[in-house]
């Protein structure tokens, strides 16, 4: 989860990689960090069209980013960002997914409190004030708000000409967004056919609303990419998830990604791991090609 464990993991990564605290502090969210990352190989890209959209919900107006191939109707994907929210990095990742042939909606999950951006341009979770503000936003979300948003976003997607309503919808989530994919898949099982959680936090808890308890309500095939640091902290979670998916007779690829720190997938993350992020991305595309047809 995006909490004090995230801070501990980033400090650990700093020490392991030999970065000075000054240099580490300079690697912040936004263009500054993106510029030091290795280029992402897109392969054959489709032309896309993109827009900022507003979606009416029962609780207000959700701002979001929508991007789709320029021609035709395609399977849709609902993307839940991490605690730093809807921002340029997630627009870039959404666009990349659209270039692979999907109509992609990246939502601002914190719209009830604030329109995007919901974190400073150079947000640093190491800063206590930033950490407190972001944690407050995260804890404002509940199973009920996720269900409302998932149902509304799916309905919105099904009204778009660029969405093929005859194909299942996918959903992806990063960090705190991982559990939101599972809540979405359980809220709209007749439409969501695939889910992917990347270093998802709190997928298995001892609480009655634990996301893994929703698996019997789902019909989605799953990819769960686990950070090595998260697995060390909760090694039993992967086995609980494997057992739950097997009992529900749902295909699920559950893997611990060696050498990764919680938060390794977003391209502006301080602990971004290019090779393992690319592996996770490729596995997501394999899942979507098989499940969203």
Image (spheres, helix red, strand yellow):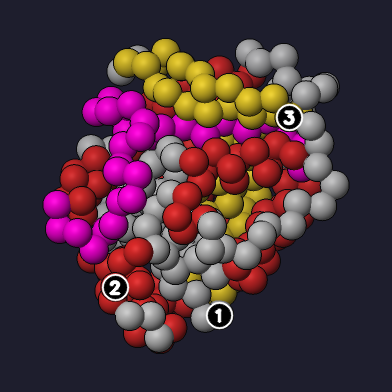
* Residue 24, quarter of picture: bottom left
119 lies above or below 65: below
Q: Which residue is mark 2?
A: 22
Q: Secondary structure at mark 3?
A: strand
Q: Are marks 2 and 3 in contact (CB under 8 Å)?
A: no
Q: Is residue 108 left or right of residue 283?
A: left
Which portion, as a residue range, is magenta? Answer: 100-129
Residue 27, given in percent of the width and then of the height, sits at 39, 63
Q: Is residue 134 left or right of residue 217?
A: left
Q: Secondary structure at mark 2?
A: helix
Circle 1 packing at 10 Å, graded few (<14), some (14-19), many (20+), is few
Circle 2 packing at 10 Å, graded few (<14), some (14-19), many (20+), is few
* Sequence-wise first label, 1 or 3: 3
Q: Which residue is mark 3?
A: 48
226 lies above or below 113: below
Residue 71, given in percent of the width and then of the height, sits at 82, 22
Residue at x-position 72% and y-position 14%: 161
Q: Which residue is mark 1?
A: 258
Residue 163, given in percent of the width and then of the height, sits at 71, 23
């Amino acid at each position: 989860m995006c909490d004090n464990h995230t801070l501990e993991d980033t400090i650990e990564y700093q020490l392991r990689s030999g970065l000075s605290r000054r240099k580490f502090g300079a690697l912040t969210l936004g263009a500054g960090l993106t510029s030091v990352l290795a280029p992402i190989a897109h392969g054959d890209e489709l032309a896309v069209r993109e827009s900022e959209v507003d979606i009416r919900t029962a609780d207000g107006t959700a701002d979001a980013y929508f991007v789709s191939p320029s021609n035709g109707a395609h399977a849709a994907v609902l993307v839940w960002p991490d605690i730093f929210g809807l921002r340029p990095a997630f627009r870039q990742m959404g666009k990349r997914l659209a270039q692979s042939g999907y109509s992609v909606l990246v939502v601002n999950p914190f719209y009830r409190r604030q329109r995007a951006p919901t974190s400073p341009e150079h947000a640093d979770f190491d800063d206590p004030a930033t950490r407190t503000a972001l944690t407050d936003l995260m804890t404002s979300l509940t199973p009920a708000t996720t269900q409302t948003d998932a149902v509304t976003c799916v309905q919105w997607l099904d009204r778009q000409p660029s969405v093929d309503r005859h194909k299942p919808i996918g959903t992806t989530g990063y960090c705190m967004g991982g559990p939101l994919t599972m809540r979405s898949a359980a809220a709209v099982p007749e439409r969501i056919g695939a889910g992917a959680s990347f270093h998802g936090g709190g997928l298995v808890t001892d609480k009655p609303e634990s996301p893994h308890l929703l698996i019997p309500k789902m019909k989605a095939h799953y990819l769960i990419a686990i950070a090595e640091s998260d697995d060390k902290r909760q090694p039993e979670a992967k086995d609980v998830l494997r057992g739950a998916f097997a009992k529900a007779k749902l295909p699920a690829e559950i893997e611990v990604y060696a050498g990764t720190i919680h938060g390794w997938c977003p391209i502006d993350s301080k602990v971004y791991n290019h090779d393992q992020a690319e592996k996770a991305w490729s596995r997501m595309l394999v899942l979507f090609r098989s499940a969203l047809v």
